[in-house]
């Protein structure tokens, strides 16, 4: 935003001067409504008169548009760009597959405001691939072969990462739909703690899948393989309602574990699990970074965390905090 040496020409001073940015309350009409926003203006630091700063008007215009769209729940230009990236589709093919005019998406990206109906349509396909899958099934014949194949590949990928044919897959998706940033490493450890706390708090197992004592802590191989394409990055899935897949008590346990453990990153969760006997006993005899596929038995998890519960009372947040603190990791 600054120009030469952070100075701009002041007409009053008739010389290059430094300036300050200040807020000025402004009101404009947007989509037929009066909207107010804090417009940024530049004033000469020497005389206090308004000065012109190249690019500042564009910044104000963009911030005003974003503010109005957010306040009125209209899709943002950046979100439309995310749709293109999510489905590996170009502007015109996206217009065609959604049954819009050929240049509609292109116009939206240039700043044209969609109607409420089209804004909601675009938001739905951004947040849930199943809506896009319907559009694709109905309109794929309107796309050329290359565009259709690219979209098909993406939709198959989203089918794979959002599937939940087993309980552990449903639990994993529930975790990934939470407010926390979850990587594959942290997901594995959270599944481990959910298994442990379900046994302690509910007296039953949520899933039968066994975790293995890998070098970086407990891992459920089927879930690791499912999301390994994300590498060390946050796993992003679509918004899915899992209330019919997981009963209320199970969801409460998951939420409880997330509230106490998902606040830590994957490395910290790994370090916590390395301090616990279920992983240590299963990994015994292997080097620190040596690959190990020894299973951590359900009985080992139950026995260890039952003893922990007797000492710290894991049904309370304070008890969980005391337990975590006792491990000396955080």
Image: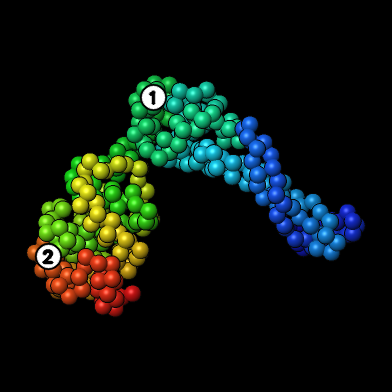
* Distance between mark 1 and mark 2 Cα atoms: 51 Å
Drawn side of residue 83 relative to residue 266, left or right: right
Where's the N terminus, which quadrant?
bottom right
Task: Residue lying at the far top in this picture: please name it.
Answer: 141
Which label sits on residue 48? none
Q: Is label 2 in a helix, a strand or a loop?
A: helix
Viewer-closest of 82 and 215: 82
Task: Quadrant for residue 296, please give it.
Answer: bottom left
Q: Residue at x 83, y 60 (%)?
A: 48
Q: Quadrant of the C terminus?
A: bottom left
Q: Residue at 78% across / 60% down in the picture?
A: 19
Viewer-closest of 52 and 143: 52
* Among numbered discs 1 and 2, the one appearing first in the sequence: 1
The structure's colour scheme is rainbow
Label 1 belongs to which residue? 140
| The furthest residue to the left | 299
**Residue 208, position as x, y percentages in the image:** 12, 53
Q: Does residue 295 show up? A: no
In the picture shown, does residue 71 fall above or below 322? above
The relative height of residue 330 versus residue 10 in the rendered view (above or below) is below
Q: Left or right: 275 with respect to 72? A: left
Q: Residue at x 61, y 35 (%)?
A: 111
In this rendering, does residue 117 appear at all? yes
Residue corresponding to mark 2: 302
For numbered disc 1, what is the local secondary structure?
helix
**Whole-percent x, y for residue 69 in the image:** 56, 40
């Amino acid at each position: 935003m600054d120009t030469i040496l952070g100075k701009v020409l002041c007409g009053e001073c008739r010389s290059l001067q430094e300036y300050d940015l200040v807020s000025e309350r402004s009101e404009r009409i947007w989509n037929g409504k009066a909207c107010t926003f804090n417009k940024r203006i530049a004033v000469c630091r020497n005389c206090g008169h308004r000065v012109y700063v190249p690019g500042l008007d564009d910044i104000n215009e963009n911030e005003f548009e974003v503010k109005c769209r957010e306040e009125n729940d209209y899709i943002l230009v950046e979100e439309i760009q995310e749709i293109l990236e999510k489905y590996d589709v170009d502007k015109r093919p996206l217009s065609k597959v959604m049954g819009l005019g050929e240049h509609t998406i292109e116009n939206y990206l240039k700043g044209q405001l969609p109607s409420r109906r089209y804004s909601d349509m675009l938001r739905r396909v951004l947040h849930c691939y199943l809506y896009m899958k319907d559009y694709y099934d109905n309109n794929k014949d309107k796309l050329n072969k290359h565009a259709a194949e690219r979209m098909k590949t993406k939709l198959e990928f989203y089918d794979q990462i959002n599937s939940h044919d087993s309980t552990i897959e449903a639990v994993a998706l529930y975790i990934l739909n939470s407010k926390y940033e979850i990587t594959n490493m942290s997901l594995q450890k959270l599944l481990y703690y959910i298994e442990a706390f379900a046994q302690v708090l509910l007296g039953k197992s949520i899933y039968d899948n066994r975790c293995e004592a890998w070098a970086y802590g407990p891992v459920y191989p089927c879930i690791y393989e499912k999301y390994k394409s994300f590498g060390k990055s946050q796993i992003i899935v679509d918004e899915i309602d899992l209330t019919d897949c997981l009963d209320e008590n199970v969801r409460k346990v998951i939420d409880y574990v997330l509230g106490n453990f998902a606040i830590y990153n994957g490395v910290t969760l790994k370090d916590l699990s390395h301090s616990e006997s279920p992983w240590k006993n299963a990994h015994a005899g292997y080097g620190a970074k040596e690959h190990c596929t020894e299973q951590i038995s359900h009985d080992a998890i139950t026995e260890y965390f039952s003893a922990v519960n007797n000492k710290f009372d894991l049904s309370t947040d304070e008890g969980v905090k005391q337990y975590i603190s006792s491990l000396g990791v955080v």
